[in-house]
Structures are given as C-alpha cells and as structure tokens.
Image (tube, rainbow, N blue to C red):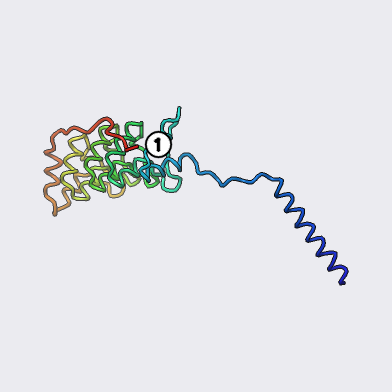
C-alpha cells in the first residue's frame, strides 16, 4: 500500500512538472482588449477629446453612431444626459445620427425634452432630428413637453414643426388632448396655438478641448 502511495505521489509531481514546463512554452495571453466601440463611448463619457477624435478620424469609421451594448445609448445620449452643448455640437458635426433610439426607444431629442434642455433641442432639430419621432409608447417630444407642463419647450417644439395632433399608442391621446385635460397649466393650449416659427441651431459648434 505504501509503495502504491509513493508511486501515486511521484506521478502527481511529474504531471505538475510537465504542466509547468508546458506553460513556459505557451506565449502569455494578453488581457482582453476592450472594443473600439467601448473605448469611444468611454472617451465621450470621460470628456477625452484626444481619444474621441482619434477614433472618429479613422478612415471609413462609423463609430460615432455606435451603441452601448447594455443600454443601446449612443454618444449623443451620453452628452445630452449631461447637458453638454460643446460635445453635442462636436458629435453632430462628425455625423452623429440624432434619430437613433436606445433600448427603450428614447431618442436624444426625447431625452433632451425630459431634461428641459432647450439648447440641446435646438441643436438636435437643427441637425436632422425628427421632431415627431415617437418612443416605444408612441410618445413624441411634444407630448412629453406637455406632460411635463413645460410651456416654453412646448412653444419651441411647435414652432419647429411638432404636430400637436399626433397621438401616442398608450392612451391614444395627442399633445393637444393632454394639454386640454391638464387644468393646472392653462398656458399649454395657448403655446400649442400661438407658437411662432423659430429657428433651430444648425451646424457644429466648437469641439471639445484637446
């Protein structure tokens, strides 16, 4: 029995030595590299103009419209969330698509309205954002502005072409319906009726500091 245990221990030691020798002959594996999409979105989050610009300047790249693998958010969603007009103008100038929605169907425009970010709304609509593009619930930017009882935002959106009669898919109500039902903010109906044409902000603004 003792002799068997001795042979077994020797075999284990030999196997261990062989494994160690094998590992020395295999090239070490570098840590997994993050994807270009991850690195670009991280650069935007970190306000790293150098890294973002390097990624955007690669020939043939479409990374400006890449999405977060978890949330579906684009770089525009990220900069809208922090109300950053400098990065917003920079990304739009690099061809960012303002109509790409996240996993909830939220476009950057809807996010800007939710945050009452009027300058962001102007830039987005001045660079191709669809004013009446709905989310997964059929809510448009104008419906959301009315629901927020934001008279200034409501007036701006109507002046830039938002349709007060477009209905959502949850309650089947339009922005005008919601405004009529809301007795707390009578100015909403006037905002829908009296908005004068406004000018959106088009073209890129100064880019991020490098």
Characterize the local packing of mark 1: few (<14), some (14-19) or many (20 or more) Cα atoms within 10 angstroms. Answer: many
Residue sitting at x 27%, y 40%: 85
Residue sitting at x 69%, y 45%: 26
Q: Position of residue 83 (x, y in %)?
A: 27, 45
Q: Position of residue 189 (x, y in %)?
A: 13, 45
In this image, 198 relative to 100: left or right? left
Q: Position of residue 130 (x, y in %)?
A: 29, 35
Residue 59 visible in rendering: yes
Residue 139 visible in rendering: no
Q: Which quadrant is the N terminus positioned in?
A: bottom right
How many numbered tags mark residues here? 1
Q: Which residue is mark 1?
A: 65
For residue 110, what is the image quadrant?
top left
In this image, 168 relative to 15: left or right? left
For residue 39, what is the image quadrant?
top left
Residue farthest toward the top in the current orientation of the protein? 59
Q: Position of residue 90 (x, y in %)?
A: 32, 35
For residue 102, what is the image quadrant?
top left
Q: Which quadrant is the C terminus positioned in?
A: top left
Vertical relation: 18 (above or below) 198: below
Vertical relation: 200 (above or below) 17: above
Q: Nearer the viewer, residue 128 or 158?
A: 128
Secondary structure of residue under mark 1: helix
């Amino acid at each position: 029995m003792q002799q068997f245990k001795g042979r077994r221990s020797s075999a284990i030691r030999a196997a261990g030595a062989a494994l160690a020798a094998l590992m020395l002959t295999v090239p070490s594996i570098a840590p997994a590299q993050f994807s270009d999409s991850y690195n670009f979105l991280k650069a935007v989050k970190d306000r790293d103009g150098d890294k973002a610009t390097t990624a955007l300047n690669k020939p043939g790249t479409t990374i400006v419209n890449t999405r977060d693998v978890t949330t579906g958010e684009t770089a525009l969603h990220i900069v809208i969330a922090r109300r950053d007009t400098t990065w917003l103008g920079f990304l739009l100038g690099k061809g960012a698509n303002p109509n790409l929605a996240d996993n909830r169907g939220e476009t950057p425009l809807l996010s800007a309205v939710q945050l009452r970010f009027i300058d962001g709304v102007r830039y987005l609509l001045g660079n191709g954002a669809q004013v009446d593009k709905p989310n997964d619930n059929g809510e448009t930017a104008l419906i959301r502005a009315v629901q927020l009882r934001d008279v200034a935002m409501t007036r701006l959106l109507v002046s830039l072409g938002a349709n007060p009669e477009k209905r959502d898919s949850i309650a089947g109500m339009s922005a005008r319906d919601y405004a009529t039902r809301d007795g707390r903010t009578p100015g909403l109906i006037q905002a829908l009726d009296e908005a004068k044409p406004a000018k959106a902000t088009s073209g890129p603004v100064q880019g991020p500091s490098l």
